[in-house]
Image (spheres, rainbow, N blue to C red):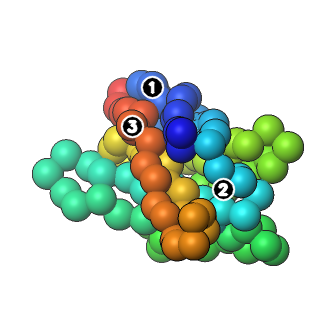
Amino acid sequence: QVQLVESGGCLVQPGGSLRLSCAASGFTFSNAVMTWYRQAPGKERELAARITSATGSTYYSDSVKGRFTISRDNAKNTVFLQMNSLKPEDTAVYYCNARFFMGGEWTTSWGQGTQVTVSS
């Protein structure tokens, strides 16, 4: 059974840092493209950061570029999102997403989300 479990979200002051983790199981993690999305209250879900499977190339939205770093540990089936210089506008539920090839087709799976609140 495919499963993604996020952790690490909490309340943090502006300018602070957080590290989110997403533990994956049920599929070949090293072959999956992993993405962190976020959804702020009243807004649509948006892509924050992505890391590919083959080369580990990364992509960031303009709103997080230079402050967030996505990384993966294929030995531990885990993807991370290091968030620095956090701003109140980073407040959102952060979701882990995996896209991988299974059973002859591309499949997408989502975690349940972890709340990040940036406030003084």
**Is disc 1 surrounded by few (<14), some (14 to 19) or many (20+) residues within 10 Å?**
some
- Report, in whole angstroms, how far the alpha carbon at label 2 lies from the one at label 3: 19 Å
Of callouts 3 and 1, the N-terminal one: 1
Q: What number is the disc on residue 112? A: 3
Task: Give percent across and percent down for residue 20.
Answer: 58, 38
**Is disc 2 surrounded by few (<14), some (14 to 19) or many (20+) residues within 10 Å?**
many
Task: Give percent across and percent down for residue 52.
Answer: 68, 70
Q: Is residue 84 visible?
A: no
Q: What number is the disc on residue 54? A: none
Q: Which residue is mark 2?
A: 70
- Report, in whole angstroms, how far the alpha carbon at label 1 lies from the one at label 2: 18 Å
For the point 73% across and 73% down, which residue is it?
Answer: 57
Rendered view: 61 above or below 1: below
Q: Which residue is mark 1?
A: 10
For the point 70% across and 42% down, which residue is it?
Answer: 78
Tell me the kind of residue under disc 1: Cys
Rendered view: 27 above or below 56: above
